[in-house]
Image (cartoon, rainbow, N blue to C red):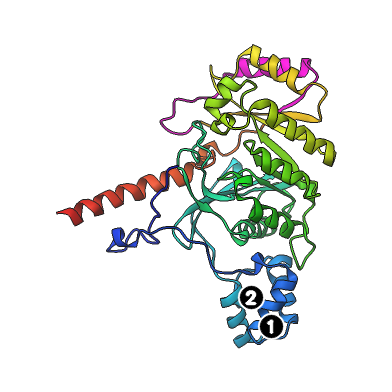
Amino acid sequence: MTILPVIPISPDQPDAVSTRRRPSMPPRHLADLDLAGRKAAVAGLGEPAFRAKQLSTHYFGRLVRDAAEMTDLPSATRDKLTTELLPTLLTPIREQACDDGATRKTLWRLHDGALVESVLMGYPDRITACVSSQAGCGMACPFCATGQQGLTRNLSVAEIVDQVVYLAGVAASGAVTGSPPRLSRVVFMGMGEPLANYPRVIEAVRRLIAPAPEGLGLSQRHITVSTVGLVPAMRRLIAEQLSVTLALSLHAPDDDLRDELVPVNQRWKVAEVLDAAFDYAAQTGRRVSIEYALIRDVNDQPWRADLLGRLLHGKLAHVNLIPLNPTPGSKWDASPKPVEREFVRRLREAGVATTVRDTRGREIDGACGQLAAGELTQAGAGAVAADAEVAQ
C-alpha cells in the first residue's frame, strides 16, 4: 500500500519539509453525533440540552455552517458551541464548474492536509452529490486516478456528512442552473472504497436519512453506496436493514481480467461477489447497479458482453456502462462509440437493463481523483525542491 506524504496546509510556509506529518482524524463535530449525543455534548459544555437542537437546526435544517448566521444563539454561547461542535473540517482549495454550471467539482483540504473531492451534478428533475469516503484509496485499480494515489486515511463521519451539507447549501442557493434548488440524491462514488470505511459510512448514511434536525432527511432509496466487491462488508450491509442502492464496480465478467482491473478480485472472485450482490437485492428488493467502465480493447469485447449478459440474466440488476474518463498520461482510454453501442445491444438482447452514464465534467478533470492528483503533483514538485534546498 502506498502512503502519500501529507501536503502542507500552505505551500508558502517556509519550512515545507518539517510540516509534513502522518495524517490524523479530525476533531469532534456535530455530525459525528446523533441527537442524544449532541445533547450530552452540549450539557458537558455547561449549556442547556435544547441548544443541541438549535445548533442541529442551523446545520442540518438551514444548511448554515457559519456561526455568525446563528443569531438566535447568545453570542458567548454561540462562540463556545460552534468552536467545540462545528470546527472547520473542509477547506475548499479549488472549485470548478462546467456543463453550463450544472456540474461543479470541489477539491478540499482536510485539517491534516489530506485532499478529497466531491461533485455536484444538476439535472432537470434532481441534484446529486457525489462524495468521498476516504482520502485516496487502497484498492489500486490501475485505470482509476484515485487508486493510483494509494490510501491516506479514512474520513470521519462528519467529514463525509459535511461534504453533503456544503453541496446541499450550494444547491439551495440556486447556483446549479436548470435544476431544482434541493439536493435529493447522494452517491458514495467519490474517492475511496466506501465499504473499507464501513462503520463511518453507515453512520454517515444514517445521519443523511434521519429527519431534520437530527439529519438531512434524505430518502434511503436516493442514496447509493458503491463497492469494488468487499464480500464480508456487502453481507454485513444486508443485515443493516437499509434500503440504499448498492452499486458494484465490476468492470469485467471474467476472473482473469478482473484480477488485473480490480485487484481485490484476487481475494473474492466474480461469482462470490455477484452472489453477495444478488443476496442484497433479494433482501432489500432494490435493483443492484453493476458499474462497468468500458475500456478500449481491454474489457469491451463482444464475448465479454455476452458473458456479462449470461451472468445477470433474470437477476434484479441493471448495468451502468461508464465511458472511461481517461486520466492524463494513462494508457487506458474510452471505447469507441460503435463498440459501446454493440456492447449495449448485446446486453439488452440478453434481457439485461442497460444504461450508459452521462459523461460529465471532462473539462474539469471529472474523473475521481484527477483534481487531487494534479494538486499532489504540484505540491510534490514543491516538496522535492524544498528537500533539495535543505540538502544543500
User: Residue 251 in the image: x percent, y percent?
Assistant: 61, 27
Left or right placement of residue 198 versus residue 147 in this view? right
Q: Which residues are magenta?
A: 327-356
Residue 340 in the magenta stretch? The answer is: yes
Q: Secondary structure at mark 2?
A: helix
Task: Give the amino acid type for the residue marked by disc 1 in the picture.
Answer: Ala
State whether residue 263 appears in this view.
yes
Closest to the camera, between mark 1 and mark 2, is 1
Residue on which the image places disc 2: 69
Q: Quadrant of residue 317?
A: top right
Measured in 3D between alpha carbons, the distance from the residue under mark 1 to the one under mark 2, in whole angstroms, is 22 Å
Vertical placement of residue 30 versus 288, above or below: below
Vertical placement of residue 122 versus 52, above or below: above
Task: Give the amino acid type for the residue marked by disc 2 in the picture.
Answer: Glu
Residue on which the image places disc 1: 43
Q: Residue at x 83, y 41 (%)?
A: 284
Q: Residue at x 69, y 57 (%)?
A: 203
User: Residue 53 in the image: x percent, y percent?
Assistant: 74, 75
Q: Earlier in the sequence, mark 1 or mark 2?
A: 1
User: Residue 378 in the image: x percent, y percent?
Assistant: 35, 47
Q: Which label sits on residue 250?
A: none
